[in-house]
C-alpha cells in the first residue's frame, strides 16, 4: 500500500516484495499468508486467500461488518483452510 514501508520490510528481511497480493495467492509454493494491511482490506484478502487454498493469519480487526465476518467464515469452511485472527503488539 505504501512503497516506502515495503522497501524497509524488504531491506530488513531480504524477502521478496509484491505490490499485488494476488501474485501471492497465485503462487502454488506458498501455503499460508499473514494479512496485516489497512483494515478495509482484511475481509477481501482473507476471503480470496481462503479461496486460493491458503492458510491464514489475519491481523485484528478481522473485518468491519457482520456480513464480512460471515463471508470469511464461509470461505474458510468451504475451502477447509486454517484461520487465526490475532494482534501483534509491539
Image (cartoon, rainbow, N blue to C red):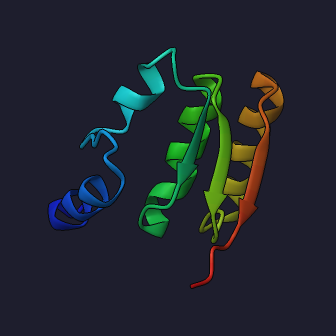
* Quadrant of the image occupied by residue 74: top right
* Quadrant of the image occupied by residue 67: bottom right
Q: Residue at x 66, y 51 (%)?
A: 57
Question: Is 48 drawn above or below residue 7 in the view shown?
Answer: above
Front-lying residue, 89 or 67 = 89
Name the quarter where the C terminus is drawn.
bottom right
Front-lying residue, 42 or 32 = 32
Name the quarter where the N terminus is drawn.
bottom left
Front-lying residue, 84 or 14 = 14
Q: Residue at x 76, y 35 (%)?
A: 76
Q: Residue furthest top?
A: 28
Residue 39 rendering spot, x and y as whole percentages: 49, 68
Query: In the picture provided, is 6 more to the left or to the right than 87?
Result: left
Question: Is 56 drawn above or below residue 37 in the view shown?
Answer: above
Q: Residue at x 41, y 30 (%)?
A: 24
Query: In the picture provided, is 16 more to the left or to the right than 48?
Result: left
Question: Is 44 drawn above or below residue 5 in the view shown?
Answer: above
Residue 6 rendering spot, x and y as whole percentages: 25, 58
Query: In the picture provided, is 48 more to the left or to the right than 26?
Result: right
Amino acid at each position: 500500500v505504501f512503497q516506502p514501508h515495503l522497501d524497509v520490510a524488504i531491506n530488513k528481511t531480504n524477502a521478496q516484495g509484491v505490490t499485488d497480493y494476488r501474485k501471492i495467492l497465485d503462487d502454488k509454493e506458498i501455503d499460508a499468508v499473514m494479512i496485516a494491511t489497512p483494515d478495509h482490506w482484511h475481509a477481501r484478502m482473507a476471503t480470496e486467500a481462503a479461496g486460493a487454498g491458503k492458510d491464514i493469519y489475519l491481523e485484528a480487526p478481522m473485518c468491519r461488518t457482520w456480513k464480512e465476518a460471515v463471508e470469511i467464515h464461509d470461505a474458510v469452511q468451504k475451502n477447509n483452510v486454517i484461520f487465526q485472527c490475532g494482534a501483534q503488539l509491539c
